[in-house]
Amino acid sequence: MVLQHPSEVEHKKNSVRVLSLVVPTTQVYVGECEADFADLQQYLATCNKPIYLVYPSTSSVSVEEQSITPDCVLLLLDGTWRKAFKMLQLNVWLTQYPAVHLAQGYESRYRIRKSSHSDSLSTIEACAYMLNALEPALDIQPLTKALDAMVTLRIKAMPSSVQARYAEPNIANGEPSST
């Protein structure tokens, strides 16, 4: 389940839209404050599955180090780091759920959005890697390929002078690729 900040809904780089296309059962709740998520809170109150908040913090634990059943509910916050933090502050009820994060070492493929955190992931990546951590045999390629396709389309729509900023590095010699 995704709690999406309203400013992300119409954003052209909206990875949750892609996530919803690949996994149609994705439930997205748009809002910022507690009242916006009243329906979600009602649902969670009657849910008979373990519920985890996906949010890295000093109190969160690595999902890879836990014994978490794949049949659980993951709550992901979708927005910039600043917006996600604000959503968490405005929705204290989220803190009743154990917080989990991914271990270090995941690199983002989401080249079209910059972050000051080298390990920042798009929501679709966080979801894919979380699902894979819970169920290692699960094929997450449909999610990563859909993200790659969206990134490629967005880059192709940019002026050529801007496209160069997003060129993938050529692994062989450390240079930008010509693709």
Image (cartoon, grey):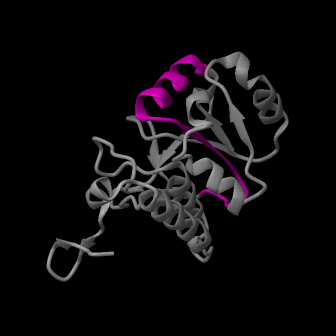
Residue 60: horizontal and vertical position, in percent? 45, 40
| 103 and 127: which is toward the camera | 127
Residue at the image point whose x is 51% and y is 35% from the top: 79
Quadrant containing the C terminus in the rendered view: bottom left
Residue at the image point whose x is 45% and y is 46% from the top: 61
From which residue to which does the magenta span run? 68-92
Residue 91: horizontal and vertical position, in percent? 60, 21
| 176 and 46: which is toward the camera | 176
Residue 110: horizontal and vertical position, in percent? 42, 56
Query: Which residue is at the far bottom?
Result: 172
Q: Where is 59 relative to 64, above or below?
A: above
Q: Where is 4 relative to 49, above or below?
A: above
Quadrant containing the N terminus in the rendered view: top right
Q: Quadrant of residue 92?
A: top right
Residue at the image point whose x is 49% and y is 66% from the top: 148
| Residue 82 sits inside the magenta stretch | yes
Q: Quadrant of residue 96?
A: top right
Q: Is residue 169 left or right of residue 133?
A: left
How many numbered badges does the structure rendering display?
0
Q: Where is 49 relative to 70, above or below?
A: above
Residue at the image point whose x is 19% and y is 83% from the top: 172
Q: Is residue 107 left or right of residue 1?
A: left
| 72 and 12: which is toward the camera | 12
